[in-house]
Structure formats: C-alpha cells, structure tokens
Image: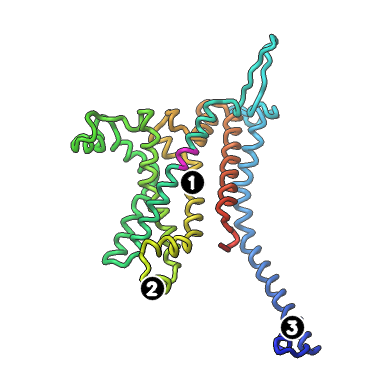
C-alpha cells in the first residue's frame, strides 16, 4: 500500500482498493488455471489411453499365468512370476522367479553399465561440441546442421551400418586399424565378449552426442552476453570463466539433457537387438522382456520383467531428480 510505505495509516478506501485488486488477481489466476487444465485434458486423456492402460494391463498380466495363445483366459497366480519357493520334500528347496533369475540380473547390470558409460561420455562430448557451436565463426550454421546428421539417422539404420563397418571379415573399421598398425588381426567387435558392449556404446555415442549438444547449446544461448563481456574486461581467464560462470548458468540445461538421455538409454532395445542379437553380454532389460514376451512364449514372465523395468527406470529417475535437486516446476 502506498500510504503504508509513507508511514501514513491506510484509509478505508485504500484498504478496499487493495482487497479489490487482490480479488482481481485471484480471479485471473483461477481463470489461467482453468484454461491450463482445459488445454491439458485432451493430452492427459490420450496419454492415459496410450500409456496408462497398457501399463496397467502389463502389471496385471505379471500376476497371472498368461501366454500368447491364452491371454484372455489368464488366471491370477500372485507373485509366482516374481518369486516362488519350491519345497522338494526332503528339507531342501529352491527359489524360482524373476527376482532369482541370474539372466535378469545380468540384463539389469548390462543396462545400468551401458547407460552410465554412454550418457557420461555423451554429456562430456556434447558439452564440448556445444561450446564450439556456440562460438562465432564462418560457416557455423552449416556445421550445426552437419553435426545433427547422426542423430537424424534412424537407429535401425545406424545399427546396421555400424554392424557392417565392424564386421570381422570385410568391415572397414578393422581394415583401417590394421593399415595403421593398431591391430594385427581382425576383431569381431560385436561378437567378442570383451568388445561387444563397447561396440554398442561407441555406436550410441556417435548417434546421440548431437542430441546432447543440441540441448546444451540451447542452454548456452540463454546465457547473457554481458556476462562474458564483463569477464573479458576484468581480465578473467577463459577457463575460469567456464567453471565459475558458464557451467553454473547452464547446469539446469545439462541436468535436463542428462535425464532425457538416461531415460532413453535405460530402455534401449533396437540398437542392442540389431547390433548384437542373442548376446548375453549386451542383453538389456528391454531385450530380456521382449524375448520372454514373444520369442519364448512366456508372456506372464515377460510382463513381470516389463513391470520391473518400469519400476527400475522410475526409481533411478526419481533418485536422479532428488540428488541433482532438479526443479521440474521451472525453478533452478
């Protein structure tokens, strides 16, 4: 109130005006909230039908004995697909189910290992590329477009292309490395246990680093130029400017980029399925679930794997948001 700021007690008319103004702001806020829900409702309905209902069905099937030829007649079996103790009658017994399946836990480890390594490399390279693309130089627009080409190529095409390049008989990668003396004999990159996972990571880094660079570049574009001009006038070293100014300002953009990329990496399927089929050294949770759902005709068991996949991704995402203190409401 103006009268209060001058040390004069507010009059009744001033109080009424303030109350009327506050009521107007409240009505405007309610109208905006109503409009927001009006626009969001169609999207939420479609999301519930496309994602919510199939998720609920998958969770339900994980508690049944469903199979591909008898989905409609599935019967409830409780937690048998997750764990079941079988007593052999002689004082001995054994646990069965997804939670005691070593192949499942191997796929969990492969998924987490692949996600951590690939996302970490992509974040570092994406940041470096974004810094270069954010600089002023001739032909910058052309370079920006060229960098996005790997990301624009469909994953299936990229995987098949790299599978040919890494072939141990006629792949160009082996030929180049043998020509320069790095290798003495061809290597089956996608079939050798020691190199299969790293072959997948290399392909993923090649394809997805441009995506990280694009998101981080968007954050760099939001940094005011006055900040750098002031630092230049003060004679601050560019490395120190990066650590003390640039990195803190683009931290929200990096965190969002990492969480988007991590979500994609944790549910990876097509790259693994095409590049290293039937390979236990690279089998991820999505591949494990798909195999049991459709190839092995263990629909209920595959549904249980899909449910745990959802829970693992949800837990890791919430944990990351909590640790990174990421404000999804728009703050920093």
Q: Cα distance, mark 2 to mark 1?
A: 42 Å
Q: Which residue is mark 2?
A: 234
Q: Tell me which segment is drawn in magenta.
A: 112-116
Q: Position of residue 81 (x, y in %)?
A: 63, 28
**Vertical placement of residue 203 versus 232, above or below:** above
The residue at 56%/43% (across/down) is 313
Task: Specify few, some or many for label 1: CA neighbours under 10 Å numbering under 14, 14-19, or 20 or more.
Answer: some
**Vertical placement of residue 276 versus 148, above or below:** above
Q: Quarter-wise, where is residue 118 in the image?
A: top left
**Vertical placement of residue 329 versus 180, above or below:** below
Towards the viewer: 211 or 235: 235
Query: If you read the primary sequence from the N terminus, does the residue marked by circle 2 or circle 1 appear first?
Result: 2
Q: Quarter-wise, where is residue 19 in the image?
A: bottom right
Q: Specify the quadrant that holds the N terminus.
A: bottom right
SS of the residue under disc 2: loop
The residue at 61%/33% (across/down) is 304
Query: If you read the primary sequence from the N terminus, does the residue marked by circle 1 or circle 3 appear first?
Result: 3
Left/right placement of residue 206 relative to residue 295 reads left
């Amino acid at each position: 109130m103006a009268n209060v700021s001058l040390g004069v007690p507010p009059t009744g008319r001033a109080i009424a005006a303030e109350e009327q103004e506050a009521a107007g702001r409240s009505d405007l806020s309610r109208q905006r909230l109503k409009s927001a829900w009006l626009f969001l409702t169609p999207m939420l309905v479609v999301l519930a039908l496309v994602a919510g209902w199939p998720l609920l069905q998958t969770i339900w099937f994980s508690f049944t004995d469903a199979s591909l030829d008898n989905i409609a007649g599935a019967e409830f079996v409780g937690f048998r697909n997750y764990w079941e103790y079988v007593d052999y009658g002689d004082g001995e017994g054994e646990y069965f189910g997804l939670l005691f399946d070593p192949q499942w836990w191997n796929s969990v480890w492969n998924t987490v290992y692949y996600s951590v390594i690939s996302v970490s490399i992509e974040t570092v390279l994406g940041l470096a590329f974004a810094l270069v693309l954010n600089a002023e130089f001739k032909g910058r627009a052309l370079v920006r477009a060229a960098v996005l080409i790997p990301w624009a190529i469909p994953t299936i095409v990229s995987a098949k292309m790299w599978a040919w390049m890494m072939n141990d008989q006629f792949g160009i990668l082996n030929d180049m490395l043998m020509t320069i003396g790095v290798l003495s004999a061809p290597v089956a990159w996608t079939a050798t246990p020691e190199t299969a996972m790293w072959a997948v990571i290399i392909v993923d880094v090649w394809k997805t680093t441009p995506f990280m660079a694009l998101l981080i570049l968007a954050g760099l574009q939001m940094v005011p130029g006055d900040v750098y001009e002031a630092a230049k006038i003060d004679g601050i070293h560019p490395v120190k400017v990066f650590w003390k100014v640039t990195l803190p300002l683009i931290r929200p953009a990096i965190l969002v980029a990492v969480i988007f990329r991590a979500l994609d990496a944790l549910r990876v399927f097509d790259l693994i399925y095409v590049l290293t089929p039937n390979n236990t050294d690279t089998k991820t949770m999505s591949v494990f679930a798909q195999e049991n759902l459709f190839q092995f005709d263990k629909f209920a068991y595959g549904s249980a794997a899909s449910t745990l996949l959802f829970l693992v991704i949800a837990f890791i995402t919430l944990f990351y948001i909590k640790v990174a203190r990421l404000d999804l409401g728009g703050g920093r």
